[in-house]
Image (spheres, helix red, strand yellow):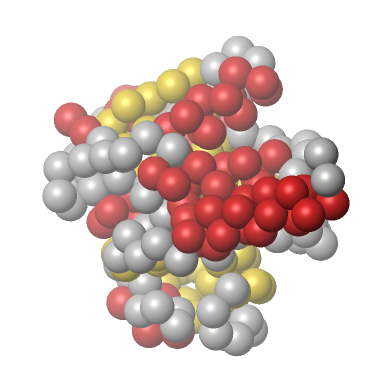
Amino acid sequence: MSITSLAQLQAQVHDAEAGFAGADWGVVSSGHARLDAVLSAGGLRRGRLVEWMATAAGSGPTTLALQAAAEAARGGRPIVVVDRRGEFFPPALPPDFPREQLLLLRCRRDDEAYWACTQALGTSGVAAVVSLLPIADERRLRSWQLAAERGGALGLLVRHLPRQPEVCFSDLRLLVAPSCAAGGRRVSITVLRARQGRPGAMVEVALDDHANPVSDLAPGRHREVARRA
């Protein structure tokens, strides 16, 4: 292959990726008006990845991701939850969550979970994909990014990490932490990274104690939640 033809091929690949990245799949609410107000798009953009990060379990990232997924699925499209650890517990979902639109995929191996996320994100008609799995290699998120841009699904990644990775392929990276404010269960959300707009904004939102997925709880409370449900 000549240098000229290689350059042409590289340009074609760049144009194709730029076309996917520029696709406007629309914007959906995060489920919290105060968070939407500090985001440049006024909400979460379909066809993009959003990381909900926390440094410790119980901070609320899974609850927030599922609330955003429910907003994305208002048109009746399915929500895909990819669960690697087997911690997701559907009976703990709130009554108004669209359970009939939920597709739960339990994967025994990391490679199966990565493949499932890629396929779901790239499938036209999927409203949102919630990823509940550890990510050892940040480069895998590049394939998820391209799949989401191609299929139009909203990718919601729940991650528990002591510090944020340097590499970021997501449209938004949000840090979720418990809030000391009085008045029920509240969390603070800080915009760590944003492809559009400036990071650094922080808001506090209230979470419903009775709408707490098991993956945000300590493992010992599984049976307690099941009895309450």
Q: Quadrant of residue 127?
A: top left
Return the x and y of residue 143 as percentages of the image width and height. 62, 41
Above or below, comparing residue 194 to residue 51 in the picture: below
Q: Quadrant of residue 195?
A: bottom right
Residue 160, horizontal then vertical, whole percent: 68, 48
For the residue pair 171 and 226, the one nearer the viewer reads as 171
Number of marks present in the image shown: 0
Rendered residue at 60%/13% (across/down): 108
Q: Is residue 221 left or right of residue 11?
A: left
Q: Residue at x 15, y 42 (%)?
A: 76
Q: Quadrant of the N terminus?
A: top right
Q: Nearer the viewer, residue 136 or 19?
A: 19
The reply to whether residue 7 is visible in this rendering is yes
Q: Residue furthest toward the top?
A: 108
Left or right: 29 as drawn, with respect to 9: left
Residue under the image location 75 percent in, 44 percent down: 139
Mark yes or no: residue 52 visible: no
Query: From what the image shows, is residue 220 above or below residue 144?
Result: above
Residue at 55% x, 17% y: name it.
107
Where does the image place residue 40, in percent across and percent down from the top left?
Answer: 45, 83
The x and y percentages for residue 33 are 31, 77
In the shown orientation, is residue 5 left or right of residue 121?
right
Identify the image quadrant of the C terminus: top left
Is 151 in front, or is 3? 3
